[in-house]
Image (cartoon, rainbow, N blue to C red):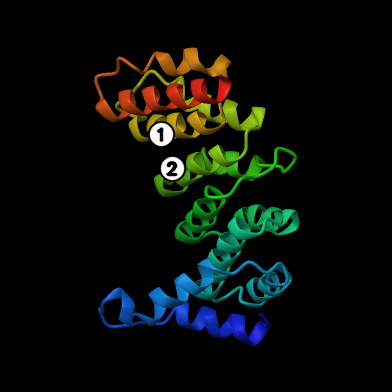
Amino acid sequence: MDEDKLYDLIARMTIKEQLTSSEESVSWNAYREAERISDETVYPILKKIIEENHKNKAVREAAYVIIGYSLRNIFNKEACIFLIQRLDEETDKYVVACILDKLARIHIPEDIDMSLVIKCSQNDKWLIRHSALNALGSSSTHANREALLFFINQEDEKKYEYEIIYANASLGSIGSKEDIPFLEKHVKSRKRDIRDSARFAIDRIKEREV
């Protein structure tokens, strides 16, 4: 897919439409098209598009979405690192959350630096913080596990309820049997979602450790 075709796809993804059914929506169908891309040659083109459109948030966000979808179909280390690095460039919370949500849906090798994702997990905006906690579950590094345990070890379940829930879920994806005792303290929580997420995380870890 060349640059013109990618710009055309992005234009269709970002088109403003009146409410219609999904099948009739140009944008919805464009997103489904983006989901099917599995061509590594798109990565340098999308990087160029993002860097050229520093004043067009909608174009950048659509390009990030395409990269995220593509990485699920055909992983490219350089493209993944670029996506992570953009967390330090973007300032709009919705764009940052978009990048994090795409990172959460791919398997990221342990040799890729996730420090910017960890930084986002401490962001004062809950949208970024929650998306980052989800994304930390995509790479089983020690640093990621420590970042998740920071919230799992919080005593104030009322203040950190959603952070604990997201951290439990991510630790269930990347944790080891050594992490189970940290999760166990939440299995008797009075908050159902915290309790259930802890139990599910423990079950997932035990299944992998067998």
The residue drawn where x is 38% and y is 18% is: 155
Mark 1 element type: helix
**Which numbered disc, 2 or 1, marks the residue that appears first in the sequence?**
2
- Can residue 123 be seen in this snapshot? no
Q: Quadrant of residue 28?
A: bottom left
Q: Badges 2 and 1: C-beta atoms under 8 Å apart? A: yes
Give residue 137's position: percent from left, percent from top: 54, 38
Disc 2 residue type (three-letter)? His
Label annotation for residue 163:
1
Q: Which residue is under mark 2?
A: 130
The residue drawn where x is 53% and y is 55% is: 102
Give residue 13's position: percent from left, percent from top: 46, 77
Disc 1 residue type (three-letter)? Glu
Residue 181 or 40: which is nearer the viewer? 40
Report the side of 159 relative to 40 (left or right): left
Q: Quadrant of the N terminus?
A: bottom right
Say few, some or many: other residues with alpha carbon within 10 Å of mark 1 (under 14 / 14 to 19 / 20 or more): many
